[in-house]
Image (tube, rainbow, N blue to C red):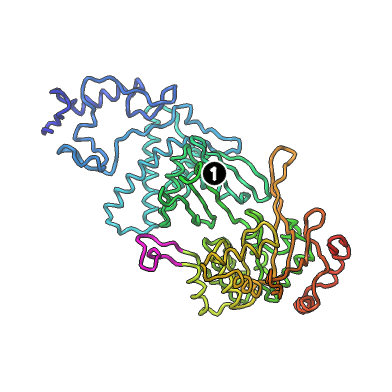
Amino acid sequence: MSTNGHHPETNGRDPLRADEWLEARHAANREQTSPFARGRGSNGTPPPPPVVEDDDPTSLPIFAGAWTSEGEGQMPGRARSEFSLRPLVAPAPEEHQDTRGTDGEVELDWELIAQYRAEISARLTARLDKEGGRVTEEDREQMGLDVIEELIKSEAETLVSTGRPPWTKDHEKALKSALHAALFGLGRLQPLVEREDVENIIVIARGPVCSVWLELVDGTLVEAAPIADSEDELREFLSDLGARQNRPFTEARPHLDLRLPGGARLAAGSWVMAYTSVVIRRHSMREVSMDEMVYDRKACSTVLADFVATCVRAGKSIVVSGVQGSGKTTWVRALCSCIPPWEMIGTFETEFELHLHELVDRHKIVHAWEHRPGSGEVGIDGRQAGEFSLEEAIHHSFRFNLARQIVGEVRGPEVWNMLKAMESGPGSISTTHARSAEHTIEKLVSCAMEKGPQVTRELAISKLAAAIDIVMYLRSEVVANPDGTFRKQRWVEEVLVVQPSIDAARGYATTPIFAPNQLGQAVATGKLDNFLAQELARHGFDLEAYKAESQANPGVATS
């Protein structure tokens, strides 16, 4: 490029002078055909650029292009800048109106927000590069907010200068909030995660359609607006979330499990599934009492609630089992509410779900451990650098003088972590998936045998039968509402007492203390043996109420 800005691709023509170009642009703006006009044609596509015999004005040295890897071969004289002249495509005038959805919220153009986000990210990256990595997360976020303010102000001025309707204050506020969530939060997912009435968020990306379903706290299933406009966009979003926590989500690592800000748990899969699927579990009810389980959720009778609460106080080890979504985590929180506040508790989870350590008024001392996956190359021990397992956490916890050890979900060999906890002290609580109360022990035996050939079935049974005292089995069912929606009902179906047995074929014995009636709800059977009955009575269990309920259900008692 020559000093007068002559470009080799101009075919010998001199470029426009700056004043000539400005006049040309003003004329184009009046015709609303400029490539820099932030609008769309009537068909939803950007309007075509004007036909100009002279060069693209952005080739002039006074216009600095964004510095990219593709720009390494740029001609001398092109200035580097953190600002890009890539035209941002804003909505047409009618789209600038403060349009609102059926819920009263301002409706936003998510395609435009994606463009804004890319521009803001580029500007923020340039500023961070200037700082040389000496920026805290708080400073980074503040710089991002400054860039958002600058861009929104610039775009608002452009609207006014081109004679377009300005944004309303509500629209501008919603736009800023959406951009902040896109950069530092969960993007379009953010408002769903913040809803107090949502328990589960299910996302299924079938090609260009990303369906979103919400399972509300009361069990109702409703459909929501998409959080992505394509499967590729959803994958990119999930990869970004995983990168923030050093958990890659790629074709080589097609599953993602992580804890979102605020405590929600995300599980996602792609590439090895028919389509990208996401399930986000929100734990809005972190503090749950037995009264709530009985009177609000109608999950059990007062007699059953009294029984399991007494078992907790008496230091019995309990396994809560059921199918997915049957309310196991909620029940563990309820059981833990019966632990005296002065007892020191340790929790061991793949991702934090119980959040007992946040309930400082109910539990005074809680030491919470979380599994941490490794990253990088695998060492000689077969593990990735930085990995921290629940087995290590259990071993480490023995120096913390714990009174209770609460192990989260058991899905495989981690059953040995549960056994270590139960053998180390009284009153441990764990969860697992199972299809019935009786199947729970067999499921745990299978999990134990996954440890290796050194674990025989006999060894696994003897360990489990000696460690587990009580099995609570939960049932869930999706039923139709009169308006065509659906809701999920959850309740306790059965409670078993587990004991070692001399039966060589089985190795353990189970006794149904509560069994399902004709409605499938657990009621007293009257089969509580005297030894356990007297032990629980010393801790406050109402034996007379238990006997009365069993007598009121003779069919269950004799089955």
Q: Which residue is mark 1?
A: 203
Percent x, y for residue 434? 65, 58
* Span shown in magenta: 372-388
Residue drawn where x is 29% and y is 41% of the image: 83
Q: Position of residue 173 (x, y in %)?
A: 48, 42
Is 134 or 96 nearer to us in this picture?
A: 134
Question: Residue at 29% of width from left, 39% of height from top?
Answer: 84
**For residue 244, which quarter of the picture?**
bottom left
The C terminus, quarter of image: bottom right
Query: Which one is nearer the viewer's eye here, 269 or 20?
Result: 269
Instruction: Determine if the magenta segment contains residue 375.
Output: yes
364 above or below 280? below
Magenta span contains residue 314: no
- Looking at the image, residue 48 sits to the left or right of residue 321; the answer is left
Judged by its main secondary structure, the magenta piece is loop
Residue at the left extreme? 2
